[in-house]
Amino acid sequence: MKNFRDRWWKLLAGVCLVMSLHLCGCGYEMDGFSSVSGRAQSVLGDGNSTLKIEHVEQVTMYPWVQYYLRGLARDEVNLRRLARWVDDGPADYTLDITMPGFLVRSSVSNRVDNTLLTDTTVRLELVVRSGRTGAVIWRSGVVRYNDKFETVDEANAIRDGLKETMSRALDRMQQKF
């Protein structure tokens, strides 16, 4: 009986190996990633194009938000290996970041529980343009994120909301539908 089980498991392992090799050989790849380069696929191509930020428009009263959005976009693009980042000079693509909406409110949860809640709503839109012609290549559409944070530091709640919204907007850049 033990000999039969050992043969069965070896046969199953062999079938799994053959199936996985077959799937890799026919060009099947994990959604959003190239099996050849290991880089993420996006509207920017295979990750070898250059990208820089052209404009950031934000509607908050916080001057640091513009620089924080620039840093978030740069870090996410580099982390996902969507493109090679350039700060100045010519680039294959440019990125415009627009914040059409922003709201931050603080309130106490209820009469019994005095927990301070910070409600943050962020709306962002990313636009990728050709670095040569300026033509719009891709638009994320307006991405909205809203969450309540239990924090005394309002700036941390804003940072968390901005980070999540930027991440979701860049997720759209990698979707193929």
Image (cartoon, rainbow, N blue to C red):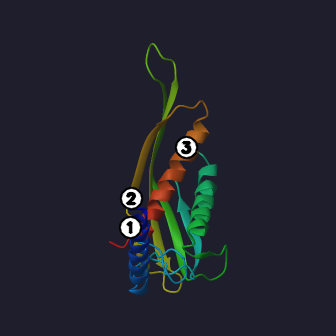
Q: CA distance from mark 2 to mark 3?
A: 18 Å
Q: Residues within 10 Å of mark 3 (few under 14, many from 20)?
A: many
Which is nearer the eye, 21 or 168? 21
When the figure is inspected, residue 56 is found, relative to residue 102, above or below; the finding is below
In the rendered structure, which amino acid carries the disc numbered 1? Phe
Q: Residues within 10 Å of mark 2 (few under 14, many from 20)?
A: some
Q: Position of residue 46 (x, y in %)?
A: 51, 81
In the rendered structure, which amino acid carries the disc numbered 2? Val
Q: Quadrant of the C terminus?
A: bottom left
Q: CA distance from mark 1 to mark 3?
A: 61 Å
The label on residue 4 is: 1
Which is nearer the eye, 138 or 102? 138
Q: Position of residue 172 (x, y in %)?
A: 41, 65
Q: Is residue 46 visible?
A: yes
Identity of the residue drawn at 45% across and 63% down = 171
Identity of the residue drawn at 40% across and 51% down = 144
The label on residue 158 is: 3
Q: Determine whether label 2 and label 3 are within 8 Å by CB.
A: no
In the rendered structure, which amino acid carries the disc numbered 3? Ile
At mark 3, the secondary structure is: helix
Which is nearer the eye, 32 or 66? 32
According to the picture, the residue beneath numbered tag 2 turns out to be 142
When the figure is inspected, residue 58 is found, relative to residue 6, above or below; the finding is above
In the displayed structure, does residue 50 sit left or right of residue 24? right
Q: Residues within 10 Å of mark 1 (few under 14, many from 20)?
A: few
- Where is residue 19, by image quadrant? bottom left
Q: Position of residue 27 (x, y in %)?
A: 40, 84
- The residue at the far top in this view is 112
At mark 2, the secondary structure is: loop
Q: Position of residue 152 (x, y in %)?
A: 60, 30
The earlier-in-sequence mark between 1 and 2 is: 1
Q: CA distance from mark 1 to mark 2?
A: 59 Å
